[in-house]
Image (cartoon, rainbow, N blue to C red):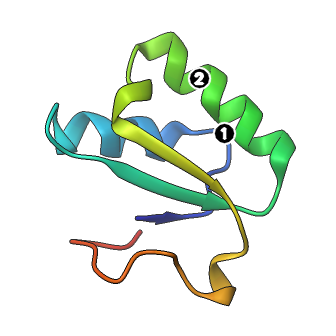
């Protein structure tokens, strides 16, 4: 899980690390930044490995369990 999608640079790195079987769940409160990140992730071809959530992570994540938080 990633808190703060930003432009998606870290999201792309994490998506490469988790491999084809893994997922990166990334939260951001700014739709404009997530749109930029979605475009960047798509250009690399890793959109199947990323789940974008438009939500303030401080309200608590939707997931009960994750392997790591960045």
Is the C-beta separation of discs 1 and 2 under 8 Å? yes
Residue 49: give x, y in percent of width and height.
Answer: 34, 35
Residue 48 sits above or below residue 33 on the image: above
Residue 46: give x, y in percent of width and height.
Answer: 38, 24
- The first of marks 1 and 2 along the sequence is 1
Q: Which residue is at a point 20% across and 45% down the rendered structure image?
A: 22
Residue 35 sits above or below residue 3 on the image: above
Seen from this angle, which residue lies furthest bottom? 59
Q: Which residue is mark 2?
A: 40
Q: Nearer the viewer, residue 6 or 45?
A: 45
Write down the quadrant of residue 39 in the picture: top right
Q: Which residue is at a point 52% across and 11% down the rendered structure image?
A: 43
Describe the element under mark 1 as helix, strand or loop: loop
Residue 61: give x, y in percent of width and height.
Answer: 52, 79
- Side of 33 where 49 appears, left or right: left
- Side of 30 where 37 appears, left or right: left
Q: Which mark is residue 63?
A: none
Exactly how many numbered labels are in the figure?
Answer: 2
Describe the element under mark 2 as helix, strand or loop: helix
- Side of 49 where 21 appears, left or right: left
State which quarter of the image contains the N terminus: bottom left
State which quarter of the image contains the C terminus: bottom left
Classify 10 Å Cα crowding around label 1: few (below 14), some (14-19), many (20 and above). Answer: some
Residue 36 sits above or below residue 26 on the image: above
Residue 4 sits above or below residue 47 on the image: below
Separation (CA) of disc 1 from disc 2: 7 Å
Q: Which residue is mark 1?
A: 7
Q: Which residue is at a point 14% across and 39% down the rendered structure image?
A: 21
Residue 30: give x, y in percent of width and height.
Answer: 83, 55
């Amino acid at each position: 899980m990633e808190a703060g999608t930003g432009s998606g640079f870290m999201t792309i790195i994490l998506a490469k690390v988790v491999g084809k079987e893994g997922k990166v769940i990334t939260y951001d409160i700014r739709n404009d930044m997530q749109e930029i990140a979605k475009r960047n992730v798509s250009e690399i071809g890793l959109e199947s490995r990323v789940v974008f959530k438009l939500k303030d992570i401080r309200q608590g994540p939707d997931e009960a369990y994750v392997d790591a938080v960045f």
